[in-house]
Amino acid sequence: MAEKKRPVNLDIGTLRLPITAYVSILHRVSGVVIFFALAILLWMLDKSLSSQQSFDSLKEMLGHPFVQIVVWGSLVALLYHAVAGVRHLLMDLGVGEESFQAGRMSAWIAVGVALASIAVITLWIFV
């Protein structure tokens, strides 16, 4: 019996994945981030609606740079997840599945839309 010589690459750092893989992986990661951020965002909503004093303390807390970064990260994850989710929904409808090139193009469009939207969110929070 002939021995099969299959390539074995166990060094993850040298793997070259296509852009479609990165978009898909980041979509999953952003979903996990949203899961944990949801608790923070719901707590903030509850605090803002409890009383005028708690609203004022939350408003003061939102001026702190660390809190701004947490809110920014939560919104970025939500935004990216939504953009990549729309891409996946369109693919489920058969749009962009004609070829590998179409899939790559839709992935780059999703990344571009997400980056542009992230820039707007960054300006909104930090400026």
Image (tube, rainbow, N blue to C red):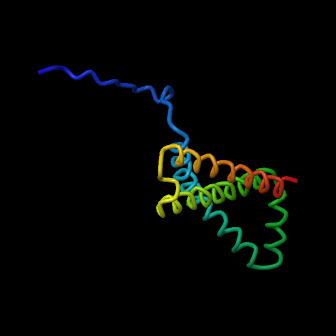
So how many labels did they put on this image?
A: 0
Q: Quadrant of residue 87?
A: bottom right
Q: Position of 58 compared to 102: left or right?
A: right
In percent of the image, x 55 and y 41: which residue is there? 19
Residue furthest right as drawn: 127
Foreground of the two, 65 or 97: 97
Position of the N terminus by quadrant? top left
Foreground of the two, 127 or 88: 88
Residue 71 at x, y percent in the picture: 72, 57
Residue 108 at x, y percent in the picture: 62, 46
Query: Considering only vertical position in the picture, is 14 above or below 41?
Result: above
Residue 121 at x, y percent in the picture: 77, 56
Query: Considering only vertical position in the picture, is 24 above or below 79?
Result: above
Residue furthest front as drawn: 98
In percent of the image, x 55 and y 44: which residue is there? 104
Q: Position of 92 compared to 110: left or right?
A: left
Residue 61 at x, y percent in the picture: 80, 61
Foreground of the two, 6 or 27: 6
Q: Position of 104 compared to 114: left or right?
A: left
